[in-house]
Image (tube, coloured by chain):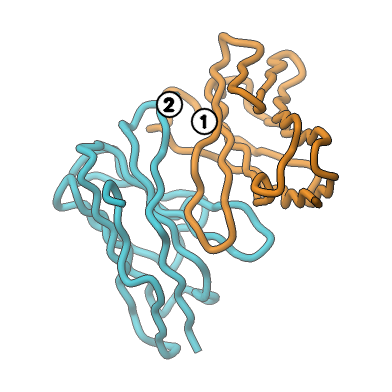
Chain colours: A orange, B cyan
Amino acid sequence: GENVEQHPSTLSVQEGDSAVIKCTYSDSASNYFPWYKQELGKRPQLIIDIRSNVGEKKDQRIAVTLNKTAKHFSLHITETQPEDSAVYFCAASMYNQGGKLIFGQGTELSVKP
Amino acid sequence: DGGITQSPKYLFRKEGQNVTLSCEQNLNHDAMYWYRQDPGQGLRLIYYSQIVNDFQKGDIAEGYSVSREKKESFPLTVTSAQKNPTAFYLCASSSGLAGYEQYFGPGTRLTVT
C-alpha cells in the first residue's frame, strides 16, 4: 500500500525566514496531496492541496510543489510568522480508495520572533 | 463550530472495558473516517466508511469496531482487545472522493489505566 515519508520531523526558523517541508510517496497511482496544519490540542485543518495534474499551487505565503516523476511534494512557507508555529502533515490519496488519506509523520515547525 | 462533532472531549476508562467514541456530521458527507494520533506520530487510519451500512478496515483496525447505520453518524468502539488504547482519536468526513477535503472533528482524548 501507499507509504508517505515526511522530513524534517522538527524545523526551527526565525520570523521572516522561509520554511520548507518535504514528503515522498511510494504509489505512483496517488493523485491528491493535501497539507494539514495542526495547532496544539486542536483538529488538523487543510491549508493547501494539489492534484497530480498540477505542478505547483500558491496561496498567499504558502505554496506546494509536486514532482510526479520523483514522487515527492513539498510545502513552502515564506515570510514566516510566529502564528505559523504548529505541526504540519502531508498526505496522499488515490481516486479509487474512497478518499482515504495516508499521512506523513508530521513536522513540528517553530517560528522564533 | 458545527460540521463535525465528537464527544466527549476527554474520556477515562479502566483496562478491560469497552468504550464507544461518538462522531456526528451535518455536512451531508458520504464518507467518514477514524484516525488515531499518538505523540510525535502522524494520523493512522483505523476504519473508514464510504456509504451507510458499509465500512472497511484501515491500517490499524485490530481491537476496534465501527458501525454506520446512519449517514450522519460513525461511532468507534475501542474494545478490551486493543493493547494500547490511550491516544487522541480524530474523526473526519468528506465527499468520499479523492481530491476533496477531509474535515476533522475536535477529537477525543482517551486515557485507559
Query: In the image, residue B96 lies at what x, y percent?
Result: 33, 32
Rendered residue at 72%/52% (across/down): A108
Q: Neighbour class for label 1 at 10 Å: few (<14), some, many (≥20)?
A: many
Q: Is residue A52 above or below residue B41?
A: above
Q: CA distance from mark 2 to mark 1?
A: 6 Å
Give the image quarter of residue A29: top right
- Indicate the secondary structure of the residue bearing disc 2: loop
Rendered residue at 49%/74% (across/down): B85
Chain for disc number 1: A
Horizontal side, residue A85 vs residue A92: left or right: right
Q: Neighbour class for label 2 at 10 Å: few (<14), some, many (≥20)?
A: many
Callout 2 amino acid: Ala
Query: In the image, residue A21 lies at what x, y percent?
Result: 75, 36
Residue under numbered circle 1: A93
For the residues bearing labels 2 and 1, Cβ distance under 8 angstroms: yes
Give the image quarter of residue B67: bottom left
Horizontal side, residue B19 vs residue A34: left or right: left
Callout 1 amino acid: Ser
Q: Is residue A11 above or below residue B62?
A: above
The N terminus of chain A lies in quadrant = top right
Q: Which mark is residue B98?
A: 2
Rendered residue at 17%/45% (across/down): B71
